[in-house]
Image (tube, helix red, strand yellow):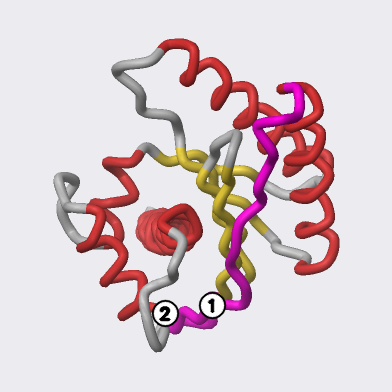
Amino acid sequence: MKILGVDPGLAEIGYGVIEKDGNSLSQIEFGLISTSSEKSDLERLNVVFEELTQIIKSLEPEQMAVEELFFNKNAKTAIRVGQARGVILLAGSRADIPVFEYTPLEVKQAVVGHGRAEKMQVQQMVKTLLGLAEIPASEDAADALAVSICHCHTESTRNSWSEML
């Protein structure tokens, strides 16, 4: 199964597609969607939608996992990222793929084993779990891969519980 993970933002949106085959995980592609601060927010949101739609068309993920927002400081930034997140959810919905959402705490718990993990610990586990030669240069792309891994682990747990019931 192919899973597209997305780390929302407005300036940079991380994405990562992984393949789950049994208990094995491998990365297919990861990267960034970048938008220019010289463009209006509407133009930037359109770029996010169009580029993510193209990624979905070309890589054909079967499911999509998106990180939920966690902000406690700047309300204006939270609103702008929330708008981008809405566009990201819309792209998944329009592509008719199931979309799942995870908090940063859930992602850290699933990838590292505890919800208070440091960013570097998450990045190191992404590298290890996917057999990458090095940690992705972009923190946003590494976070997107972590969201994909979280979804794989969560789905495995859900399926195990379903089978037991």
Q: Secondary structure at mark 2?
A: helix
Circles 2 and 1 in contact, beta carbons < 8 Å = yes
Find out whether residue 74 is within the magenta segment.
no
Say which residue label 1 marks.
27
Residue in view at x 25 percent, y 54 percent: 119
| SS assignment for the magenta stretch, majority | strand
Residue 32 occupies which quadrant of the picture?
Answer: bottom right
Mark 2: give few (<14), some (14-19) or many (20+) Cα within 10 Å.
Answer: some
Image quadrant holding the N terminus, namely: bottom right
Amino acid marked by disc 1: Gln
Residue 99 occupies which quadrant of the picture?
Answer: top right
Residue 139 drawn above or below residue 126:
above
Residue 152 drawn above or below residue 51:
below
Residue 80 in sight from this viewpoint: yes
Whether residue 72 sits left or right of residue 141 in the image: it is left
Whether residue 78 sits left or right of residue 109 in the image: it is right
Amino acid marked by disc 2: Leu
The label on residue 75 is none
Q: Secondary structure at mark 1?
A: strand
